[in-house]
């Protein structure tokens, strides 16, 4: 559950004993540690010396009942940020090693081509030296990827890789010609080059996995990384399959990326969503996903202890099964500073274990942030540059503090959220698959789908509105007691000022939930937001979509606007959103549902600087009627509820600023 990544200084027995003393003071604060191979690419003799030192370190921790795993600190290489390290094991006069090369022909002098035989031999030999410590698991660091090997952004496109491609497909492309074809030519060439990249990365994984299993057959294999680009294809099978096949065990994953300090704590929401998205790309046999929590550098004026614990809790709520902490990697603080953090881990441990155990086999309930499966193969549009297809545009964090439950899990989703970027990038087949589903979207996205030739599949059209208007909430059930109130996004609210769209009824079935009016004269200017129908090719009605021509993606909104968005999403879902926070507070709501769609928990995180009022939470389709509340500092059994039809209304305690707790259901 709780894994600590050690620093290079912990090869010292004295430093390790100091840490073990702190761990011993705080029960359950550490279950496993990772010792790390040397950064850089020094001669094998240095790796052998380091492995011998780590064996002694491992012995100390195992004697205290703590598991010991190994992190391989670099594979392809992290980039020029490591240029001061020792690379003489690969870089020397006359070395045959091939550096990784970008599309422009420039190379990264501190990173290496994943196909290069000299490099692969070095990785095999160095890995075997470290495997001799018989680690419980081996975690490959996140530089095993086809991007971000600065100064090379994407690779590898070295001469040998281009020749390899030409030999495989009986072509004679130059690098420039191949780059042009993979970006602007027939899609087959892009697919084939992505396959070349995947095979190369997979080959490197095979080499490392074989080196481990030949020495330590009981070790599991694991990968550290995230889903940020599509340059190596959509899924992760290039590393999961060879790890599983060669080791004979299901691999593990450490998703993450960024958020090194909590000066802006809201960034943990962005990271949690990226982690959740990464988890959705894992095959079903990867059941152990341990979130990356990095406090880099781990110092007193960096990320706070409570911010560290909040981040971990949020990641568990979004589907991780354990937590890995990079909070000990530098010797910049005395060991008792780290003891304070271990003390808090100990206090959170019972809550964290309960979250992980309760969430096995569950997914995020509520709205699914729609991501195109086919975007990496899409045709580039006029004005786009080469490799624009490779980048993933994550979105949705604006909804979290408004209380709309969202994530990237598509199983048992109550509704789907469709952004402008997704509408641009999805294939026609994906549009067809989305039409029968309940979708929350905006005028820009609907305009794109209409322009792509799907206009007849919607019971409404849209047009941009040029006038400076407000919205008035019309007399519909969705608006409740807020009928007649108005809303206008303030210029001072910041963020992207998206153009407003008028929703135009085309089939007589469009239901307006808001109308525009000129705020000075009161002149009506058309429908602002509406529920519309979608149709199949035979004009049979398929589903309801909620289309917001005005202010869907903004988090600085009124309580009335918040209510309108949540209720519209709930109506198109048929009243199946698992949990709705009735109180207008800046609290993230993260429900988990089991395979049958029953709600098993709801985690709430106050993402504001204010203490909330008591919270009223509606829970739908619970897995039972035994409700309890838990957090690091709270444990309340037998929560009372009021039953309203099939809904359950719970009254929950007020939350102080930036705190978290979970309603468990059994």
Image (cartoon, grey):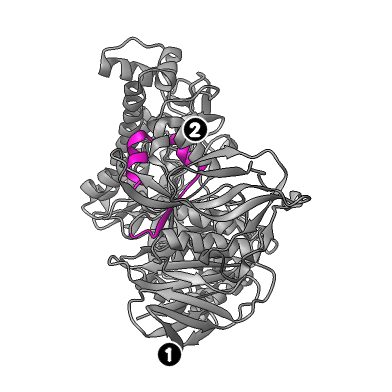
Residue 367 in view (yes/no): yes
Q: Is residue 324 above or below residue 104?
A: below
Q: First in sequence, mark 2 or 1: give its number.
A: 2
Q: Which residue is mark 1?
A: 638
Residues in magenta, as a range: 412-436
Look at the image and tell me in which quarter the N terminus lies.
bottom left
Q: Position of residue 607 (x, y in %)?
A: 62, 66
In the rendered image, residue 475 lying in the magenta stretch gets the answer no
Q: Which residue is mark 2?
A: 88
To which quarter of the image does residue 452 belong? top left
- The residue at the point 36 percent across, 34 percent down is 428
The secondary structure type at the circle numbered 2 is: loop
Between 182 and 54, the one nearer to me in the picture: 182
Describe residue 21's horizontal placement relative to residue 224 as left or right.
right
Residue count near mark 2 (Cα–Cα under 10 Å), binned few <14, some 14–19, many ≥20: some
Side of 333 relative to 604 (left or right): right
Please state which of residues 116 and 614 is positioned toward the viewer in this rendering. Answer: 614
Residue at 22% in and 46% down:
246
Residue 462 placement (x, y as % from top left): 53, 40
């Amino acid at each position: 559950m709780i894994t600590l990544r050690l620093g290079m200084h912990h090869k010292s027995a004295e430093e390790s004993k100091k840490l073990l003393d702190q761990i011993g003071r705080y029960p359950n604060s550490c279950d496993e540690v990772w010792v790390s191979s040397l950064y850089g690419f020094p001669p094998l003799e240095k790796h052998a010396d380091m492995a011998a030192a780590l064996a002694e370190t491992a012995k100390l921790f195992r004697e205290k009942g703590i598991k010991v795993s190994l992190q391989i600190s670099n594979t392809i290489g992290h980039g020029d940020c490591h240029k001061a390290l020792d690379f003489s094991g690969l870089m020397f006069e006359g070395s045959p090693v091939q550096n990784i090369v970008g599309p422009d022909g420039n190379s990264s002098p501190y990173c290496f081509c994943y196909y290069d035989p000299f490099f692969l031999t070095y990785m095999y030999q160095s890995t075997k030296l470290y495997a001799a410590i018989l680690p419980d698991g081996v975690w490959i660091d996140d530089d095993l990827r086809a991007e971000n090997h600065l100064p090379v952004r994407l690779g590898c496109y070295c001469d040998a890789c281009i020749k390899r491609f030409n030999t495989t497909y009986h072509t004679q492309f130059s690098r420039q010609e191949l780059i042009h074809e993979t970006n602007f030519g027939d899609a087959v060439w892009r697919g084939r080059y992505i396959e070349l990249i995947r095979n190369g990365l997979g080959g490197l994984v095979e080499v490392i996995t074989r080196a481990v299993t030949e020495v330590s057959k009981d070790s599991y294999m694991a990968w550290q990384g995230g889903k940020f680009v599509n340059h190596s294809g959509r899924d992760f099978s290039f590393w999961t399959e060879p790890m599983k096949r060669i080791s004979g065990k299901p691999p593990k994953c450490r998703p993450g990326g960024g958020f090194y300090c909590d000066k802006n704590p809201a960034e943990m929401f962005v990271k949690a969503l990226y982690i959740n998205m990464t988890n959705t790309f894992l095959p079903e046999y990867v059941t152990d996903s341990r979130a990356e929590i990095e406090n880099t550098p781990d110092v007193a004026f960096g990320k706070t202890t409570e911010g560290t614990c909040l981040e971990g809790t949020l990641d568990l709520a979004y589907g991780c099964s354990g937590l890995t902490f990079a909070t000990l990697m530098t010797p910049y603080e005395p060991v008792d500073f780290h003891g304070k953090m271990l003390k808090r881990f100990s206090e959170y441990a019972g809550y964290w274990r309960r979250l992980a155990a309760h969430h096995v086999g569950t997914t995020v309930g509520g709205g699914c942030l729609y991501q195109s499966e086919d975007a990496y193969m899409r045709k580039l549009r006029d004005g786009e540059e080469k490799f624009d297809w490779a980048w993933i545009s994550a979105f949705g964090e604006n909804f979290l503090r408004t209380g709309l439950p969202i994530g990237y899990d598509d199983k048992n989703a109550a509704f789907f959220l469709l952004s402008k970027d997704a509408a641009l990038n999805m294939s026609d087949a994906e549009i067809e698959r989305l039409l029968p589903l309940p979708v929350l979207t905006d005028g820009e996205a609907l305009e794109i789908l209409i322009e792509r030739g799907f206009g007849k599949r919607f019971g409404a059209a849209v047009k941009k509105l040029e006038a400076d208007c407000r919205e008035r909430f019309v007399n519909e059930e969705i608006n409740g007691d807020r009928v007649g109130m108005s809303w206008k996004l303030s210029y001072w609210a910041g963020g992207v000022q998206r153009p407003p769209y008028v929703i135009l009824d085309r089939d007589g079935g469009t239901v307006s939930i808001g109308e525009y009016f000129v705020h000075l004269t009161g002149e009506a200017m058309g429908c602002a937001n509406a529920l519309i129908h979608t149709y199949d090719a035979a004009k049979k009605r398929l589903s309801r979509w909620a289309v917001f021509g005005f202010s869907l993606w903004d988090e600085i909104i009124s309580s009335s606007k918040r209510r309108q968005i949540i209720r519209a999403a709930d109506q198109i879902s048929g009243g199946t959103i698992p949990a709705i926070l009735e109180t207008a507070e800046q609290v993230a709501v993260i429900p988990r549902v089991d395979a049958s769609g029953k709600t098993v928990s709801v985690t709430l995180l106050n993402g504001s600087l204010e203490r909330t009022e008591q919270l009223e939470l509606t829970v739908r389709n619970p897995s039972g009627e035994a409700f309890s509340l838990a957090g690091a500092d709270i444990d309340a059994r037998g929560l009372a509820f009021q039953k309203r039809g099939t809904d359950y209304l719970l009254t929950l305690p007020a939350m102080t600023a930036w705190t978290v707790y979970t309603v468990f259901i059994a």
